[in-house]
């Protein structure tokens, strides 16, 4: 059961991370093959509640495959994926999934798009309205509820998709390169929004990206994969402040060191199995 509502605004990230807790998602000796193709091999990784994890690695190393197994879209070939101590089964309703494409329904207004999961959950009209208003406020779209997706900018569409993702209050958010198509400035704004919202709601995040700056600036930890079959080559702690200004963080010495280290890790000479 979900414990939080969207309206709760206490940042429990710092305090929850100060106390050792049971991991939320655990991959133990996970391998996944599709026919003869082995996508990932022997992945062991624990994700803790309230943690923001980024996943980077060469194309085809199985990052999305890990998200898909967390969502219960398919099981591992070997090993186990558990969520709160229980093996993930089809489907894991505690997670929400957001990809590069926003999948907004063009014939529905912003408010009606956000309302989709709430309608499926058979909430009453009044409850849906209250919830949608709250979500519009949260993602910075107050006043745009009656607009249609084709009347929105790229950033606003992302905000709308994010609000819909949050509507049923999933405790873990899976992001697969959600901002890849945005220009640099917009991407930075959306990154700031994501960190603000995730901290505010104390969500756990697995975020796949090819952008190494994004991988460092967003994360509490960054998981680096080697080429296919994907194995974890390193898990980097990102000891940057929980409350960070993503504009000025680029001048931070630690930030520069971490991104440089990631670039070194990702140098072509270090890739074993590029597509
Ligand atoms: N459902 C599937 N059926 C068959 N093959 C798959 C399936 N899902 C993934 N693969 C294959 O597994 C490998 C890993 O794919 P995956 O999408 O997880 O990699 P990725 O690291 O997320 O790649 P990218 O960064 O390019 O998105 C690829 O070779 C892909 O073609």
Image (cartoon, rainbow, N blue to C red):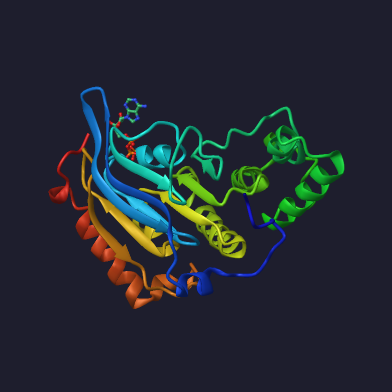
For ligand 1, give the image quadrant: top left
- Residue 28 vs residue 159: left or right? left
x then y, percent, for residue 153: 64, 44
Given residues 269 and 225, the one toward you in this image is: 225
x then y, percent, for residue 120: 71, 32
Which residue is located at x 70 percent, y 41 percent? 114
Which residue is located at x 72 percent, y 51 percent? 135
x then y, percent, for residue 245: 51, 71
Residue 201, quarter of picture: bottom right
- Residue 270 vs residue 88: left or right? left
Residue 20, quarter of picture: bottom left
- Residue 23 vs residue 8: left or right? left
Tally of marks: 0
Given residues 182 and 44, the one toward you in this image is: 44
Residue 198, quarter of picture: bottom right
- Residue 162 vs residue 121: left or right? left
x then y, percent, for residue 138: 69, 57
Farthest residue, direction front: 86
Which residue is located at x 22 percent, y 27 percent? 37
Residue 163 visible? The answer is no
Farthest residue, direction top: 35
Which residue is located at x 67 percent, y 54 percent? 139
Q: Quarter holding the C terminus? A: top left
Residue 201 visible? The answer is yes
């Amino acid at each position: 059961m979900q414990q939080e509502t969207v309206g709760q605004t206490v940042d429990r990230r710092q305090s929850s991370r100060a106390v050792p807790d049971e991991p939320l998602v655990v991959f133990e000796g996970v391998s996944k093959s599709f026919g003869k193709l082995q996508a990932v091999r022997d992945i062991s990784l624990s994700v803790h509640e309230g943690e923001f994890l980024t996943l980077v690695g060469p194309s085809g190393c199985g990052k999305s495959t890990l998200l898909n197994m967390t969502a219960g879209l398919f099981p591992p070939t070997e090993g186990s994926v558990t969520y709160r101590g229980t093996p993930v089964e089809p489907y894991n309703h505690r997670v929400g999934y957001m990809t590069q494409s926003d999948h907004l329904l063009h014939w529905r207004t912003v408010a009606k798009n956000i309302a989709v999961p709430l309608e499926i959950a058979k909430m009453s009209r009044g409850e849906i309205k209250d919830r949608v208003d709250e979500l519009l406020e949260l993602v910075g779209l107050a006043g745009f509820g009656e607009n249609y997706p084709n009347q929105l900018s790229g950033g606003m569409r992302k905000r709308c998709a994010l609000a819909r993702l949050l509507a049923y209050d999933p405790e873990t958010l899976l992001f697969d390169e959600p901002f890849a198509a945005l220009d640099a400035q917009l991407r930075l704004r959306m990154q700031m929004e994501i960190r603000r919202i995730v901290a505010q709601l104390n969500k756990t995040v697995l975020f796949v990206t090819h952008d190494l700056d994004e991988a460092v600036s967003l994360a509490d930890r960054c998981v680096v994969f080697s080429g296919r079959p994907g194995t974890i080559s390193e898990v980097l702690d990102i000891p940057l402040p929980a409350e960070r200004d993503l504009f000025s963080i680029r001048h931070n010495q630690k930030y520069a060191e971490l991104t440089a280290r990631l670039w070194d890790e990702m140098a072509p000479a270090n890739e074993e199995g590029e597509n």
